[in-house]
Amino acid sequence: MTAPRTIGTMKVLWIFAHPEQRSLNASLMRDGLRELALHGHESQVSDLYGMGWKAVLDAADVRPVPASGSRFAVGAEQERAYLGGEQSEDIRAEQEKITWADTLVFHFPLWWFGPPAILKGWLDRVLVQGFAFGVRDADGRTLRYGEGGLAGKRALVITSVGARESSFGPRGIHGHIDQVLWPLLHGTFWYTGMAAHEPFVVHGADRLGPAGYEDVARGLRRLLRGLPEAAPLAYRHESGGDYDEDLTLQPWIAPGQAGLGVHEVCAEPAPTG
Amino acid sequence: MTAPRTIGTMKVLWIFAHPEQRSLNASLMRDGLRELALHGHESQVSDLYGMGWKAVLDAADVRPVPASGSRFAVGAEQERAYLGGEQSEDIRAEQEKITWADTLVFHFPLWWFGPPAILKGWLDRVLVQGFAFGVRDADGRTLRYGEGGLAGKRALVITSVGARESSFGPRGIHGHIDQVLWPLLHGTFWYTGMAAHEPFVVHGADRLGPAGYEDVARGLRRLLRGLPEAAPLAYRHESGGDYDEDLTLQPWIAPGQAGLGVHEVCAEPAPTG
């Protein structure tokens, strides 16, 4: 259903959102990029703080700026500017990097259980209708969830938290990290067609000594080496027959169950009758 | 466990994040504020776009700005600046409004299944350690989830989506809206001690005619009138005995289950033995 993912050499766009270049996360990024180069992968970096990335989507993102008398209809204006080559230059440059890449890494400290505003603003401004989503097939069907403007790419979250691992586990008080990150993993990556990989999480980030850091860096290097062959999260395709016309799960899928977990494929009885 | 919530007259801080003053959301806010005034409630508005709110947390948020030789340790510097009265003025002003309010309304269009960057940046910059969280009781225990710096207040999300209602329902493809908004409802509101209310969601926001708008506005007015007496989402208290030392659910709570839903209180068998 999706284009085949690249096996072998990767083209990685590493999107980094941390205000401090001497942070643990900045060190991890350097280690990661070095490992990628060592294995023949190519990479580009969007260091959002370093670039002074404009976080806030507004009417200045599109040209001509809507006249003061006319309403700024956000999604429609973004699409018009994208299709007409009238987006602001910083947005266009990021879309070009995404088009080049087959792998997107989103690397950030977890703030209020999500990405820092500067990264949220990268999503808001760059992943516009017509480019990342709202794309149609030959029959006029809108492609979403497993298909879409970014289909065939893979995406990986790398994030750091102060909390210990158990508290982000399946029954941990903060919620399971895969479900806490649902808006990114399912709502952004999978929605636009990208395969979402299991996030790489640094726990107890405030308390890591040098030995702890080495463990984490080793884990990240291993994950990056294996990424071309790794299986992504098994989210259901919108067009795979699991959803009905109202975009709800068919009654024979995970019957009687609810919650975000039902949108992952697992062993289940086939429909009968 | 938490301070009693105000019954009767509310002091509402309405935090609004939409770039267009002629949007459906802007109209809804005006309707909502009018209804509040009509019933004797007080309100203040933080119109983030209108204020030109700075979305990006950085070292300039704290004074003195960390010297170029020293690392910007985000959480610790925010807390130091808060306690020492050395935060930038825009942050201090928002904290003062929060302290005044007993009810916080977060009103935004849902972009990538979360708040626009300008609002995410309000959370990142304003809800600092020592003020909203990381507060301890007399025994040195850190107060979280049902207790904390904002305990006794209530919080309400008002948001608009293009999708139809079924797709955000319990088995809808986008995920149930309460779980999609988990980082805000549980991870921000409840974490800091605020009672999180069921979100008010405008579905099919791009396709609402005048009659549709009137229905929505009527629903919002009704909700606002009832808010002082409304029951919030029944999330579990961290200190209520439902979690163990590792911050995972006790084995007798929702045994064998996982997913975000287990963190809500529901009828369940009492532990035996």
Image (cartoon, coloured by chain):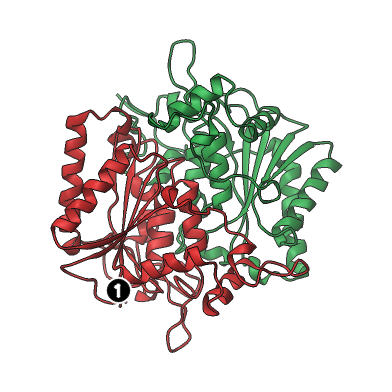
Chain colours: A red, B green
Horizontal arrangement in the rendering, residue A166 relative to residue B222 (left or right): left
Residue found at x 75% / y 62%: B22
Which of these two is toward me, A222 or A196?
A222
Quadrant assignment for the C terminus of chain B: top left
Q: Determine which quarter of the picture holds residue A214.
A: top left
Quadrant assignment for the N terminus of chain B: top right
Where is residue A262 shown, x and y percent of the image?
Answer: 36, 58
Which of these two is toward me, A253 or A131?
A131
Which of these two is toward me, B172 or B253?
B172
Where is residue B254 shown, x and y percent of the image?
Answer: 36, 39
- Number of numbered discs overlaid on the protein picture: 1
Residue at the spot of label 1: A272
Residue found at x 31% / y 41%: A25
The chain holding disc 1 is A
Where is residue B234 shown, x and y percent of the image?
Answer: 52, 37
Residue found at x 55% / y 40%: B123
Residue B1 in view = no
Residue B8 in view = yes
A89 shown above or below B85: below
Mark 1 closeness class: few <14, some 14–19, many ≥20 residues within 10 Å:
few
Q: Secondary structure at mark 1?
A: loop
